[in-house]
Image (spheres, coloured by chain):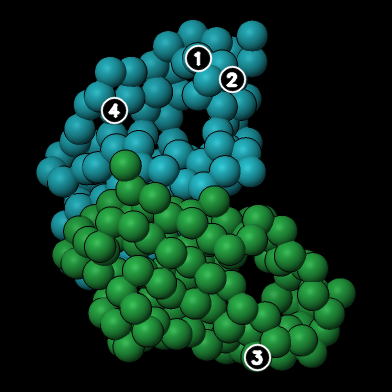
Chain colours: A cyan, B green
Amino acid sequence: RKEVEQDPGPFNVPEGATVAFNCTYSNSASQSFFWYRQDCRKEPKLLMSVYSSGNEDGRFTAQLNRASQYISLLIRDSKLSDSATYLCVVPLNNNDMRFGAGTRLTVKP
Amino acid sequence: DVKVTQSSRYLVKRTGEKVFLECVQDMDHENMFWYRQDPGLGLRLIYFSYDVKMKEKGDIPEGYSVSREKKERFSLILESASTNQTSMYLCASSLWGGNEQYFGPGTRLTVT
């Protein structure tokens, strides 16, 4: 199994839709997880952290399933501005993190 | 606001040239990282450093070296550039033990 694996997409959804991405990881010792957002031709930026079972921030919900070793990102009421690539990130230790290849989302009017 | 800057946004070099990519951060972060990003492969770690003069190999260090003489600066060196090193190079920094990495804007390197 790859260290971090994501469905590359693309996901094309209409405005207002709910969309979910999954990410699987191989390091069972990882304690915290992250979702980064990367806009086209821009650098990645932290979107959400997941330290326990889940985290919610407005329209965004990140959930963690340790038994099955996956994390998910749910976006409700999608906006055009949500169009981006979403990167799943899994720490190997405190200072070294592994990035997934990313899931591309396009929200259409 | 954390700021990570990279010396060039776009760079074109010839095969065999020595290439220097510079990265500077202004938040006194201990950790600094160099990644390359290629379509379908995501970010792959080349090298990272957790202190001045310290360096650790990442997943794909072959063909690269790094230098960290000052805490705020982390340089990536391509000793003899090859066409398969054409890529987007991203620098990042973070606090020791910290989780969030802050990225620079990237350098798109083309080797012809």
Q: In this rendering, would B62 be left or right of B83?
A: left
Between circles 4 and 1, the one closer to the viewer is: 1
Which image quarter is the N terminus of chain B in?
top left
Spatial CA distance of label 4 from label 1 is 15 Å
The kind of secondary structure element at disc 2 is strand
Q: Residue at x 56, y 27 (%)?
A: A83
Q: Residues within 10 Å of mark 2 (few under 14, many from 20)?
A: some
Amino acid type indicated by mark 1: Lys
The residue indicated by pointer 4 is A61
Viewer-proximal residue, B111 or A36?
A: B111
Q: Amino acid at mark 2?
A: Val
Q: Earlier in the sequence, mark 1 or mark 2?
A: 1
Q: Looking at the image, which residue is at 65% across and 91% down?
A: B79
Marks 1 and 2 in Cβ contact (< 8 Å): yes
Mark 1 vs mark 2, CA separation in Å: 6 Å
- What residue appears at the point 13 percent right and 43 percent down from the top-left corner? A52
Q: CA distance from mark 3 to mark 2?
A: 42 Å
* Residue B89 tag number: none
Of helix, strand and loop, which one carries label 1?
A: loop
Please report, as a chain letter, where disc 1 is located: A
Q: Can you identify the residue that label 2 sits on?
A: A107
Label 4 CA crowd tier, 10 Å (few <14, some 14–19, many 20+): some
